[in-house]
């Protein structure tokens, strides 16, 4: 049977895979994990293996690719066994800005129309309150005359 033969060849390749994994990782435990992941991935994708090609080369390629993937992943990770680093990471909630804006809109709605327009004109043009735009000055002068 093809699967029995492939299984026997994979099992026979384990010592060579382990030696290669140890040379990559420098750690026997990590090497064993890497070999195990290699065997699991190879067996899961055994249908992609082309009969008549070099099984050892295929297995070594899987192992090397897994090693490089783990290496890239570990480069981005931060060692934080006690959680002290994660405890320092904080982001301020962004809902306060929205709540402030809603309070502003509610307060603006309570103003009379002419004062609301004057305030919006000052805010839109960016002029300081000391020097309001002409239309606001005209409205102020008009309201004083009345």
Image (cartoon, grey):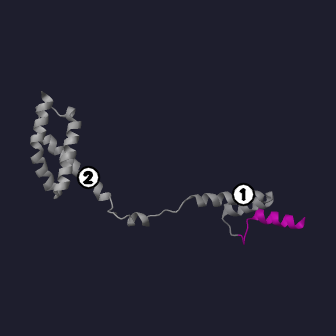
User: Which residue is painted at 15% across and 52% down in the image?
Assistant: 21
Give the image quarter of residue 98: bottom right
- 80 and 102: which one is in front? 80
Sooner in the amino-acid sequence: mark 1 or mark 2: 2
* Position of residue 80 in the picture relative to residue 98 (left or right): left
Residue segment shown in magenta: 129-146
Residue under numbered circle 1: 106
User: Which residue is painted at 86% across and 64% down in the image?
Assistant: 143
Give the image quarter of residue 8: top left
Numbered circles on residues, count: 2
Measured along the vertical axis of the image, is residue 99 above or below residue 44? below
Residue under numbered circle 2: 70
Q: Secondary structure at mark 2?
A: helix
User: Which residue is painted at 84% across and 67% down in the image?
Assistant: 141
Q: Which percent across, then down, holds residue 123?
A: 68, 63
Nearer to us of marks 1 and 2 is 2
Residue 140 included in the magenta stretch of the image: yes
| The C terminus - image quarter | bottom right
Task: Inspect this view and state whether residue 132 appears.
Answer: yes
Task: Inspect this view and state whether residue 51 appears.
Answer: no
Q: Which percent across, then down, holds residue 64?
A: 18, 48
Contact between marks 1 and 2 (CB within 8 A): the answer is no
* Position of residue 40 in the picture relative to residue 114 (left or right): left
Q: Which percent across, then down, holds residue 81?
A: 33, 63
Q: Secondary structure at mark 1?
A: helix
| The N terminus - image quarter | top left
Dominant secondary structure of the residues highlighted in magenta in the image: helix
Q: Residue furthest right?
A: 146
Measured along the vertical axis of the image, is residue 145 above or below residue 44? below
* Position of residue 76 in the picture relative to residue 100 (left or right): left
């Amino acid at each position: 049977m093809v699967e029995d033969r492939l299984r026997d060849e994979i099992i026979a390749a384990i010592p060579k895979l382990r030696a290669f994994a140890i040379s990559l990782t420098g750690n026997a435990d990590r090497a064993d994990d890497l070999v195990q992941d290699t065997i699991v991935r190879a067996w899961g994708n055994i249908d992609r293996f082309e009969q008549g090609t070099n099984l050892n080369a295929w297995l070594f390629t899987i192992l090397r690719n897994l090693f490089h993937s783990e290496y890239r992943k570990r480069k981005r990770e931060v060692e934080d066994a006690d959680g002290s680093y994660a405890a320092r990471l904080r982001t301020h909630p962004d809902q306060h800005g929205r709540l402030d804006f809603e309070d502003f809109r509610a307060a603006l709605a309570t103003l009379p129309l002419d004062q609301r327009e004057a305030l919006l004109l000052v805010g839109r043009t960016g002029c300081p309150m000391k020097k309001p735009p002409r239309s606001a000055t005209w409205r102020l002068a008009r309201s004083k005359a009345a």
